[in-house]
Amino acid sequence: MLTPLFSQNCELVGWMQPQKFLFDTDMGYVAFVTNGHAWSARSGRWIGPVVASHVFDVDGRPVAWNPSAPLRGSGRPLRPVNVVRAVSPVRPAKPVAPLRPLKAPDLPGGWSQFSFAEWLVSSDPKPVEIVEEIVAVETADEVALVEVAEVIDGGEGGVQDDSKSSPDTVK
């Protein structure tokens, strides 16, 4: 049985197969749950704790909830030990749209700064970080190539003109 998950604004954001998997509203597999923690299906990284039918970010603030259980804020959880990635589940049939809760609880610590979709990728490497890493590697490679070229050229940095080569030069 799937449990609907709602945002702070009481909008349906996803579904939970209790203590097993999280799905988006299109029933796409987005996270797995092991030992009370959610892990990104995309990267396998920890994205936060799961308590009853509520999911929290890594700071302990709720991201999505279900009115079937009382929602309480918590302090920052300890990061769990990494786990083996779950096998992707069979895509479940889309359930009938649930009744929308009237109001989300107000919590002393507040709600997460992330929407459900943002939370799912919040611990994944960001595209900007990936691009920066690629540029750094490419830049390092260019620097290495320039240094190699300078050593080969004798430090002049130019290309040798074969038309002016001496008779001793082997072609």
Image: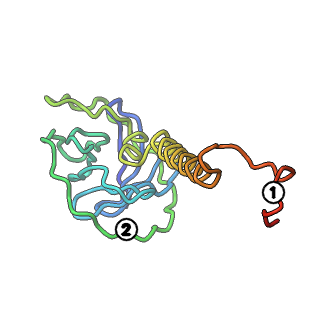
Q: Mark 2 falls on what kind of element? A: loop
Task: Determine which of the numbered discs, if any, sits on residue 85 in the image.
Answer: 2
Q: Nearer the viewer, residue 157 or 92?
A: 157
Is 132 displayed left or right of 69 in the figure?
A: right
Q: Residues within 10 Å of mark 1 (few under 14, many from 20)?
A: few
Q: Residue at x 81, y 57 (%)?
A: 166
Q: Nearer the viewer, residue 55 or 122?
A: 122
Residue 9 locus on image (x, y percent): 35, 29
Q: Quadrant of the C terminus?
A: bottom right
Residue 111 locus on image (x, y percent): 25, 32
Q: Amino acid at mark 2?
A: Arg
Q: Is residue 71 above or below residue 39?
A: above
Residue 98 locus on image (x, y percent): 41, 44
Which sits earlier in the primary sequence, circle 1 or circle 2?
2
Residue 161 in view, yes or no: yes
Task: Determine which of the numbered discs, if any, sits on residue 64 in the image.
Answer: none
Residue 25 in view, yes or no: no
Number of numbered discs overlaid on the protein picture: 2
Q: Nearer the viewer, residue 43 or 147?
A: 147
Is 128 displayed left or right of 148 in the figure?
A: left
Q: Mark 1 falls on what kind of element? A: loop
Q: Which residue is mark 1?
A: 166
Q: Residues within 10 Å of mark 2 (few under 14, many from 20)?
A: some
The image quadrant of residue 57 is: top left
Q: Real-space Cα distance between discs 1 and 2?
A: 65 Å
Q: Residue at x 87, y 51 (%)?
A: 163
**Colouring method of the image:** rainbow
Q: Amino acid at mark 1?
A: Ser
Is 47 displayed left or right of 13 in the figure?
A: left
Q: Residue at x 29, y 44 (%)?
A: 66
Q: Is residue 144 above or below residue 109?
A: below
